[in-house]
Image (cartoon, helix red, strand yellow):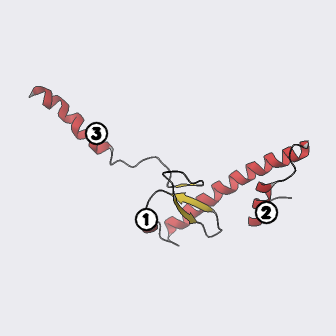
Amino acid sequence: MRALLRLLPVLLILPAISFLPSNEPVYSLSRTNSYENRYATQKGVTFFVKLRSFEQEYPLNSPERVQLDGRIEHDYFSILSHNCRMETQRLDWGDQHSTPNCDMLRQFDPGLVS
């Protein structure tokens, strides 16, 4: 009986931990096994979510969705900008002949890349 009483706090705490919110992001810019539901922002940036209830939690044009779309677009543009800088550097060195990330960046804002 005493052993059971000693285990009782552990048995109560472990299931409670599973209900705590996780630190996993809501979205991913690439499709994986857990992030497989595809969506796009207003500017056409594709992203993937794992929640089947995504549309209920982030309805289109809601403040939450607008904020999330902004974060997604910021992350996407940051990655494109970084990759474009790398492509431009490789182009200057003669190691690369095309700049697909710079081309994608130009599609969203022609003034971003010279």
Please give the label number shown on residue 7.
none
Crowding at dot 2, Cα within 10 Å, few <14 / some 14-19 / many 20+, comes out as some
The residue drawn where x is 79% and y is 60% is 103
Q: Amino acid at mark 2?
A: Arg
Please say if the residues under marks 1 and 3 sit with CB atoms less than 8 Å apart.
Answer: no
The residue drawn where x is 46% and y is 68% is 55
Looking at the image, the residue that sits furthest to the bottom is 61
Query: The residue tagged with tag 2: helix, strand or loop?
Result: helix
Please give the label number shown on residue 106.
2
Q: Quadrant of the C terminus?
A: bottom right
Looking at the image, the residue that sits furthest to the front is 33
Query: The residue tagged with tag 3: helix, strand or loop?
Result: helix
Question: How far from the left and from the top, in percent, is residue 110?
Answer: 81, 65
Provide the residue designation for mark 3: 14
Provide the residue designation for mark 1: 57
Crowding at dot 3, Cα within 10 Å, few <14 / some 14-19 / many 20+, comes out as few
Q: Amino acid at mark 3?
A: Leu
Q: Quadrant of the N terminus?
A: top left
Question: How far from the left and from the top, in percent, is residue 90?
Answer: 85, 44
Quarter assignment of residue 52 = bottom left
9 horizontally vs 112: left or right: left
Please say if the residues under marks 2 and 1 sit with CB atoms less than 8 Å apart.
Answer: no
The residue drawn where x is 74% and y is 53% is 81
Quarter assignment of residue 9 = top left
Question: How far from the left and from the top, in percent, is residue 12?
Answer: 22, 40
Query: The residue tagged with tag 1: helix, strand or loop?
Result: helix
Along the polypeptide, which appears first: circle 2 or circle 3?
Answer: 3
Along the polypeptide, which appears first: circle 2 or circle 1?
Answer: 1
